[in-house]
Amino acid sequence: MTSATATLPAPLAPAARRPWRKPSVLPGFGLALGFALLYLSLIVLIPLSATFLKSATLGWEVFWATVSAPRVLAALRLSFGASLLAGVLNAVFGLLVAWVLIRYRFPGRRVADAMVDLPFALPTAVAGIALTAVYAGNGWIGQYLEPLGIQVAFAPLGVVVALTFIGLPFVVRTVQPVLEDLEPELEEAAATLGANRLQTFRRVILPAVTPALLTGFTLAFARAVGEYGSVIFIAGNMPMVSEIAPLLIIIELEQYDYAGATSVAVMMLLISFALLLLINLLQWWSARRTGRL
Amino acid sequence: MSIEVNRIAKRFGSFTALDDVSLSFPSGQLVALLGPSGCGKTTLLRIIAGLETPDAGSVLFHGEDASDQDVRERQVGFVFQHYALFRHMSVFENVAFGLRVKPRAERPSNARIREKVMDLLKLVQLDWLAERYPHQLSGGQRQRIALARALAVEPKVLLLDEPFGALDAKVRKELRRWLRRLHDELHITSIFVTHDQEEALEVADQVVLMNKGRVEQVGSPNEVYERPASPFVYSFLGTVNVFHGRAAGGRVHLGPVSLGASRHADVEDAPAVAYARPHEIEIERFSPGAEGIPAQLSRLLVVGPTARLELERDDTGGIVEAEIPAARAASLSLKLGESLVVRPRRMQVFVERADAPPAQALTLES
């Protein structure tokens, strides 16, 4: 007994120094954390800081002049505007697709389920060419839209279509498991309590899938911001109209304007980071409000 | 409000869940639907609630046909086995849900909702948990909240689907007593589904025994336990020993034992099954000529005032369970492996005949 009391204070001491570290049966906290940080640095942090360093060679004045040029602003506006719109579209229709795949049994369900992943697997250039062929003025769908005055290919709308295409799997795949776990009893309980279908959806189902939906939206949005391959084929790439920011970076690189290219890249990084942070805060807030934290 | 179900049938593919079931549930009673899993009891409950549509038959509430009514219009409170609480809502909001989704014209004011929810939470003795979330509660607490939520809309009927099935034994026992007290306070017509015979017998006013989509027996707990109407009910309620034999000319022959069955005189020769509960079995040390079925003592367990014996029959190798007073066991000074004779003091005989009604109960006095 006496020997036990003598050794007790020793393991307590580090815990007191680091109150955020919970005791765990799995060893290797230091090693795991160290490796994770090193890995993140090599893969994410160092390349990104190189971007910042390169653009810093310009000096503040030139940097500001570069990123506030009308053409750059238009490109940034299009990139983030179309990405947000595509994210919202995917959130709405991705939820619908996930719902149908989970809730209904129909012939070809597995095929439809597999089809959702295609935008992941397809080279983006192929997607861009395919979408252009379909939505161009003489394409399958484009030929009916054109007379109605709706131009998809070679217009900002085309950008939204391409970004929606590549972002769809993110929403479906994040929402699907959550919907699968959602017991039908919840809906039955709501019905026995007198709730109609709309109330059941709005008050019971939607709040349950909201965190997953937000995650899916974030992923789809982030993917859309960085998308390049599929967009350049369908967008038409007219400066000030349908030119996206990643393309602008390529154009400046081709003109050996490295500092200019990294300036635009830094702007994109900052805006992306701010928006992702905002969405994360939103998620935290919604988790907090519903007692999951 | 009374409930009646008329000739309900329901199939799932090739599986018959309910086969021509007719029952009536008198107003204000607590009725248990009891049976093994897959017997159709939950399906029947869900049909009464309107969560499932029968293939045939009708459901009557207070004498009125409710078959075409939607779940929302039936005014039933339903409690699920796994609680089905809304995870993203606090306990308070869960209970308030039914009031908040009412059409604007009928919806009570916020103050009124608050008052009513707190009253209900007090009724289930959990008002101190109003601001918690379901995942912060224990299973027993969750089920009480689910019950409060169901009661909030003032249902005319309360339906509970294995309400204590997911809880551990001690909490189960507490909760079923509590449910009984609650029912005595509210007097709302209630039906609960269970596969636990002890639960059904302890809590319910009436027990409906179901098997393979049919009703086997309806009666008070005492009736169904003491006078089972079919071999199924006998073997389902409590431990029972089964003896196979033949009935012929007013006697039932069970191996070496032959018992007179005067009410059975018309049976010429038919297979018969006899049931005896462990406490109805007598034990005697084996001696040549002793009346009874010879058996060997394979297990002896003395707990408190009773001794539980497991005996292996010499003729068939089947196991017979017996319960005798511990004092009697001591005076016999039983040893494992010893040869004994087993004699049923009282048993119920069912004769299997093609033309007979499904179950014919006879009590024999030896």
Image: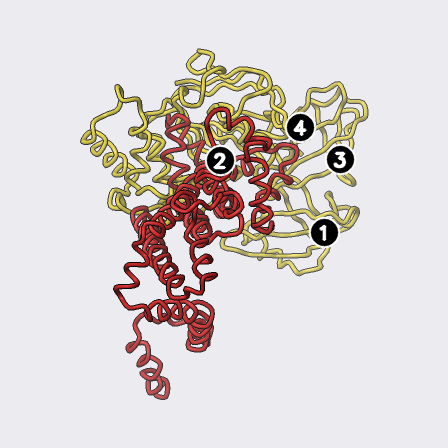
Chain colours: A red, B yellow
Image point (49%, 40%), residue name: A154
Packing grade of label 3 (10 A; few <14, some 14-19, many >=20) is some
Is label 4 or label 1 in front? Answer: 4
| Tags 2 and 4 both on a single chain | no
Tell which residue pokes out farthest to the top in this image: B64
Q: Kindly state the secondary structure of the residue where label 1 is placed.
A: strand
- Return the chain for callout 4: B
Tell which residue pokes out farthest to the left in this image: B111
**CA gap, disc 4 to disc 1?**
43 Å
The residue indicated by pointer 4 is: B13
**CA gap, disc 2 to disc 3?**
94 Å
Packing grade of label 1 (10 A; few <14, some 14-19, many >=20) is many
Image point (56%, 28%), residue name: A143
Q: Amino acid at mark 3?
A: Ser
Q: What label does residue A152 carry, if any? A: 2
Residue B207 visible in rendering? yes
Of labels 4 and 1, earlier in sequence is 4
Q: Amino acid at mark 1?
A: Glu
